[in-house]
Image (cartoon, helix red, strand yellow):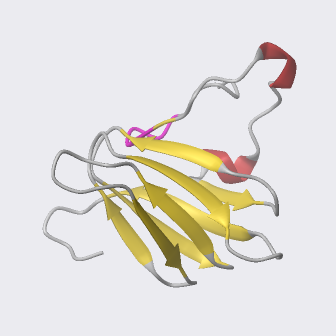
Amino acid sequence: MSAASSSLPSLSLPTRAAAAAAAVPSAVRRGAWRIEVGEAMTLKATEASVLRVRQGRIWVTCDATATWGSEDLVLAPGESLRVAAGQRLVLEPWDGYGATCSWDAATPGAAS
C-alpha cells in the first residue's frame, strides 16, 4: 500500500506529491487518524460512511450540496457524523490539542 492510496472502500484520499510520500502509519490502515494542531485533512466518501471523533474536538466543513449550503460543525469525543457517498469534508482540530477520529462504512438503517 502506498501513501497515496487507501484500502478503505468507503474513502478516497487525495494523492500526494512523491516527495511528501512516506509509509502509511498503522492508524491510517485501521481507518483512524490523528490530526495535529495546524493541520487540515480532506476526506471524500466513496460510499455512505460515518466519521467518529475519538479524542479532542474536530471542526468539520461539509461541502455544499444541491439542496444545502456549505456547513461548519464542531464534533466532540463520542459524537459522529453520517457522510453520504460522494460528500467531501475538511477536518481540523478545534483547539490547541489535536484530535483523533475514525472513518467506517455506514451500517444501513443505523443512526449515526
Residue 11 lies, in percent from the top left, at: 44, 41
Give the tally of numbered discs: 0
Residue furthest to the top: 18
Query: Which of 106 and 77 lies nearest the eye of the viewer?
Result: 77
Up-down relation of residue 41 to residue 97 (above or below)? above
Where residue 25 sits, quadrant-wise, is: top right
Compared across the picture, whether 74 is left or right of 109 comes to: right
Q: Is residue 56 left or right of residue 69?
A: right
* Residues shaded magenta: 7-11
Snapshot quadrant of residue 85: top left
Q: Residue at x 15, y 53 (%)?
A: 67
Residue 8 picture location, percent across and down: 47, 41
Residue 58 is drawn in which quadrant? bottom right
Question: What's the residue at 37%, 55% (across, down)?
Answer: 70
* Dominant secondary structure of the residues highlighted in magenta in the image: loop
Relative to the observer, which residue lies in front, 111 or 96?
A: 96
Taking the spot 67% from the left edge, 78% from the top edge, the residue there is 55
Q: Is residue 8 magenta?
A: yes
**Which residue ends up furthest to the right in the rendered image?**
19
Q: Please state, as top left, top right, bottom left or bottom right, where the N terminus lies in the image.
A: top right
Above or below for 4 versus 81: above
Residue 9: where, in percent of width, then height?
39, 38
The residue lying toward the viewer, choosing from 80 and 9, is 80
Identity of the residue drawn at 20% across and 73% down = 110
Q: Quadrant of the C terminus?
A: bottom left
